Structures are given as C-alpha cells and as structure tokens.
Image (cartoon, rainbow, N blue to C red):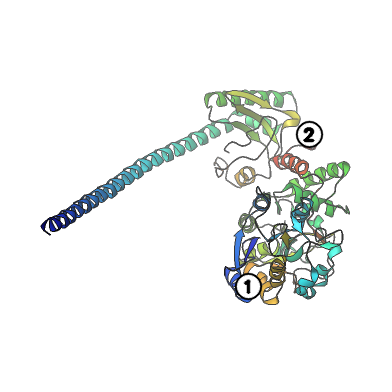
Amino acid sequence: MRSGLLFKLALLLAIFGILSSGITGYYAYTANRAMLVSATQSDLLTAARGVNRRMVQWEDEAADDTLLLSRLVQVQVVINQRNGSEARRARDELAQAFAAMLALHPEYLQVRLIGTADNGLELVRVDSRSGLTARVDGGDLQEKGHFPYVFETLALPAGQIYQSSIEVNHERSSHDAEGGPA
Amino acid sequence: MAKDVLRVLAWPGYADPDVVHDFERRYQVSVEVTFVDSDEALWARMHAAGGPRFDVVAANTAEMQRYHAAGLLLPLNPSLIPNLQRQLPRFRDRAGIPGLQQQGKLYAVPYTYSTMGIIYDKRQFARPPDSMNVLWDPRYRHKVLDFNSGPHNFSFAALASGIAQPFRLDAAQQAAMVKRLIDLRRNVLTYYNLPEEATELFIRHKVAVMFGNYGTQQLNSLRQAGADVGYAIPREGVLAWLDCWAMTRAARQPQLAQQWINYMLEPSVSALLPTRQGLANTLSASADLPSGARVLWLQPVENANRREALWQKIYSGDLPGSF
C-alpha cells in the first residue's frame, strides 16, 4: 500500500516537474522567437531604408547626368539639323560622350537621344553590356514615340526629368537591354 | 456510401459556390472545383503526368481544338444536354463555330463569350465608328490605344484589310500586316496590357478610340470611371473568344459530367454571367452584339511564335526596312 502511494506521489511530482520544465521551456522558446523575429525585422527595416536611400541617390545622380548630357551643345545641332556633315559630326561626338558616361557608370545600360520628329526616332544611341559599349546606328535605330518615357516626357516643361516606373524591359533590338530593369 | 465526385476545371466565376451547392443537392453528388487563371495553367493541368484529373473543363474554342487534337476530350451526347435547345441560333450552328465539332461529333458546348470590339469616346465621335480602320485614321493620331499582343493585332489588322482568313496568314499577308501594324504604331498613343491600365490612359490622355481586347468588361470599367464611351462592332467583323464546356477523357461518369454541362445552360445559372461577371451568355441576346454581326471566334493562328517574334520587333520600334 505504502509503496503504491509513494509511487503515485513520485509519479505526480514527476509530472509536475515535467510540466513546469515544459512550460518554462515553451515560454523561453516563444520569448526567444519573438526576440529573434523582432531583431530580424529591425535589421530588415534598416537594410530596406539603406536601399531606399541609395535608390533615391541613384535616381538623383541619373537625373543630374541626364541634364548634363542634354545641355551639351551637340544636342541642339543634332535636333536642329538632321542631315549634313555638321550634324553627322555632332552625332558622333554625342555618341562618344554617351559612351564615356556609360564607361563611368557600369550600372547604366543605355544612353539615347530621342527626337520628337519621325515618330520618336532615336537620333543617337549607345548601349552597354558587361562593361562594353556599342553604338547603335542607321537602320538599327528604333522609333520610340509610343513609349511613356517619350510621350510623358514631352508633356513636361523644358528642363524637367521624367522617371519611368521600374519594370522589366520588353523592348528588343540588336544590342538590347531586354530582360533587364528599365 | 460515399457520394460520387465530379471534378471541374474552370475559370473563376464559372462555378460559384452557390451554383455548385445547388448542383450537389440536386444530383446528390459532391463537386470539386479547380480554378485556373490562364490558358497556360489550363494546358498544364490538362497535360499533367498520367492525364487530366478532371471530368469537365471550360476553355475557349482555340484551346478546345488543341485539346481535341491531343486526344484529351470525349464526344458529348446532345440528347443528354437538352438545354442546348435554349441557346441562341448563333450558338446552335455548331458547324459554323470551329472547335465545337470534330467528324460530326459534338465535343464542346458554348457557355460564355466576349467580343473584342471598338471602344470610343462619344464626345469625339458624331457617329459611332463602323470600321476597324478607324484605329489607323490620322484624325485620331496619338489618341488611339491598342492591346500589346502579337496574335490578336495581326488578326484584326487582317480583318481591317479585308483578308478572309485572319487566323491563317500566308507569308505575303504576314509581311503586309507588318507594314500595317507599323502604320498603326505610328498612330497610337501607346499599348496597354491590363484593363485598368487602359482605363487610366483613356481618361488621362483623352483617348478617342481603342481596340477593346477585354470587350464589354472593359467598357463597364471605363463607364464606372466616368468615361462617356460607346462600343462598336466593326463592319468587317469582330474577334471574339468563346468559352465552352467539354468532357475530358478522364471522365469517370460521363452522364454526370453531361448533367453538369446541361446545368450550366439552365437559364438561372447562365443568367449569372452578365450580372456577376459582366460577360455574355449563350441563351439571351446581348445588346452589344447585333444579331447579324460577323463574329470571328478565336482559332489557333498559322504560327503563333512567328507572329509573336514579329510583334516584338514592331512593338520595340523597328523601322520597316529591318524585317
């Protein structure tokens, strides 16, 4: 009898012991998990803020570079004189300036001057891929008047910058940026 | 005893829970519905290893032709689908709609459709436009919207050019359509992909006319956004998709599968398509489609990859000399 009681008591105590350690363990686990989640969220937030800051900075820099290129004197010559040796020379010089810009900024994939005449035909275009620049010219130039980055830009006052929405580029050409970000 | 199970593969809106529940009660069966949101997803489900795991499937006429060619469908018995008698004459003319019959046997039953007509701003048109060629009209230069899709654009350009078989273009016709689509590119403001994108562009840029790839559903969304728009069916004919029900070769109980198809054509069930989905049904005439209008139900095109490759060049802005 006595040994039976003792056994039951021991069993009860053991169950309490297991229960209490189980509960303690469970609380420790949930508390730790909550702390880990909170720490990770905080890390992610900091990283996202950092990326956001860099993105804004890149956008500002790209806008400055665009304004700089647009004020080159050759741009006026190319826009106002479509033919002739002076226009051809100006286009070549612009292409060199675009290539220099692409060489300085490997993150840029393309620099173009697009006219409003001829359905938004590209006038000067230089593409960059894996650090190599390639000029696209003649019959390989394309009409871009139907893309928002042309018709929305034309609706802006002179000197303002149009920033396209960030999406995957589906345009294709001989040296294309297809499949990359645009 | 376990209830019989009917396995349905369909698009969202074709088998709402209340509709399914009524069918289950009526026939004392259980219905499992699987929804898909693209033709590609549908094709993948129908081509799963070991064959389709569905008794009935809803797909458009072009897809039905592919499924039949792949041996995935079973013929239907019209006497088990008495509601076929309730359909409009246009849909009872089974020989006139490619994809419904094969070797004289019925394989697909029309259920719902949408035309791809012309949507126009009533304030910019004294009379509704009556030809597809309005999209090329220089009076509306940069006031035109088009859908970004190779296969459809080639088909409607062919319709506008008076080509009798717009889904079967030979090389010369294809080359001529490339030129026409470049001309169209020069007349459009831009191309849209999603209906909401089209609505936003239409209103913000005071667009005059557009190719309505999403048909009357798109028209409704424009009206809700406050646009004063009309819908026109061009005299050359209008492209349209037509979704049908069919029985797969995996159907375990053909009679139950055909009872489902018949049930889909009950007036109370088909009536939900216009009210809930903004789609037309095959039982009652739609105000947006005159009874005599020429409708070209979508068919597989002569070479979809070729059309898509050419379209990518057109869309990207290639000059006419580079094709």
Label 2 crowd bin: few (<14), some (14–19), many (20+), radius 10 Å: few
Q: Residue furthest left?
A: A2
Q: Which mark is residue B322?
A: 2
Does residue B297 appear left or right of residue B193 in this picture?
A: right
In the picture, the quarter occupied by the C terminus of chain B is top right
Q: Is residue A87 depicted above or below B27 in this figure? A: above
Disc assigned to residue B23? 1
C-alpha distance separating marks 2 and 1: 58 Å
Quarter of the image where the N terminus of chain B is located: bottom right
Q: Position of residue B50 (x, y in %)?
A: 66, 49
Say which residue appears at 29% left-offset and 49% top-offset.
A30
Tag 2: residue type? Ser
Secondary structure at numbered mark 1: helix
Of residues B97 and B219, the one drawn nearer to the viewer in this rendering: B97
Quick one: which residue is furthest to the front in this view? A1
Q: Residue at x 77, y 66 (%)?
A: B126
| Residue B225 appears in view | no
Discs 2/1, front: 1
Tell me which residue sits at (54%, 41%) in the image: A161
Looking at numbered disc 1 in the image, what kind of residue is underneath it? Answer: Phe
